[in-house]
Structures are given as C-alpha cells and as structure tokens.
Image: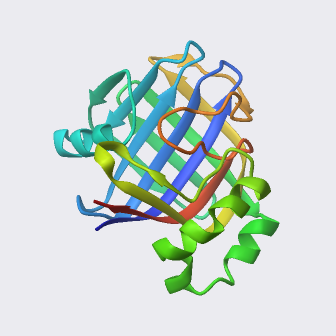
Amino acid sequence: MDRFRGYIAGLGTSSGVRLVVGHWLDSPFGAFTDVMAEHDDGVRTLLAPSDAVAEYVGGTYRFDRTVVAPVDAVLSASALRVAAGPLRLEVELGPVTVLGRLLEHVPAPLAVAPWWLRAVNPVAGLIVPGVQTAGSAGGGRREFYGVRSIRSLVAATAAWDGADLGQLRRIDPPVKFGFSSVPATPQMVAVTTTILP
C-alpha cells in the first residue's frame, strides 16, 4: 500500500489550460510536488521533479508527454506558489468551503479508509459531479481519495513558457488523467491518496 498525504489544487484558466497540482508532504518519495496540465487541445503533460516520480505517476495516470524538471513549491496560509519546468503559478487561497467544514468532522482513520471511500463513492459523485473517491489506477492497482478539508481558490496568475494563461476559471471540460476529475469549481483539498496493488 502506498500513501500520499498532502494537498491537491485544481483550477482552470481562461486560456483553456487546466492544472492539477499535487503538493505532497509525505509519500513513498518523501515530500514533493508534481503538476498535471491539460491544454485546450487535450494534450496532457506531467511535470515531475524526478525520474522516479515521473515513472510512478506516469504508471498511475495517463499523459501524452512528461517533463522532468525541478519543481519548487511553497504553500502558505494564503497562497500556493509553484515553479515547475515551463509553468509559473501563484494561487490565492480562499476560505474553507461548507463541504470542507463538514469533512473536517469525519474521524481521520475513517476518512482515509479504503472500505469507507469505496462505500461513499456513489454519494461523492452526486454531491460533486465528476468526482470519485475510489477507482482503478494504472497497472491494475486501486486508488482511493480521502479528502479531509476543502478551501476555495479565489485568484490565480499563471504562465506557460512565458505566455500568460489568463484568469482563474472553472475546470471545464473535466481533466482526463485518471478515473476521476477534480471538482469543476477551483479549490484545494487536504487529502490522503491510497494506492493498493
């Protein structure tokens, strides 16, 4: 069993580029940050800080290309800043959402238990369309998302290869890296991701 504990931020931009940032405090690879980007033409790019992370994430999700480059990320109480290969991103964090406050009351061991996440998966998709808490990862593995809290994203500045990506937008259409998209509304979740063989 592999566990990744940290944060996932998902956002769209007015250019059509949609971004998913995984900021992991604890994982089989230690602390690291990676970025999944899907452009308006559907091309999916992984930005990974090492070959080992690129191999693991690339074997779990689907990408059209991978860039291995230093990924520098700083998460504060008010913002997330990321410099990764061609991407420069700064996101302003808003308050905890209503759903996020409810999730904070779920006991931690239950919130991340695969059996629980499998049981609540049908309800999760009804509450947040397009989102799943349990599904199939690459290589025949199973994956579970245990979300502990949710914060809204209220503003973002982003550039790809120096070109401005525009203003913060909903994630529309949904991203297609794995079995679940991130929520359409830009937000950052505190999450434990569990991957079973």
Residue at image location 49% in from the left, 53% down from the top: 135
Task: Tell me: 172 left or right of 113.
Answer: right
Name the quarter where the C terminus is drawn. bottom left
Residue reaching furthest left? 51
Q: Quadrant of the N terminus?
A: bottom left
Residue 128 drawn above or below residue 179 = below
| Image label count | 0
Closer to us: 95 or 149: 149
**Camera-side residue: 32 or 55?**
55
In percent of width and height, residue 43 lies at 47, 18
The residue positioned 77% from the left and 67% from the top of the image is 99
Q: Position of residue 128 (x, y in %)?
A: 74, 53
106 to 156, vertically: above or below: below
For residue 57, say whether it is visible. yes
Residue depicted at x 25% and y 62%: 30
Give the quadrant of residue 31.
bottom left
The image quadrant that residue 42 belongs to is: top right
Residue 135 placement, left or right of 197: right
Query: From the viewer's perspective, is residue 119 above or below residue 58?
Result: below
Residue located 44% across and 17% down the image:
161
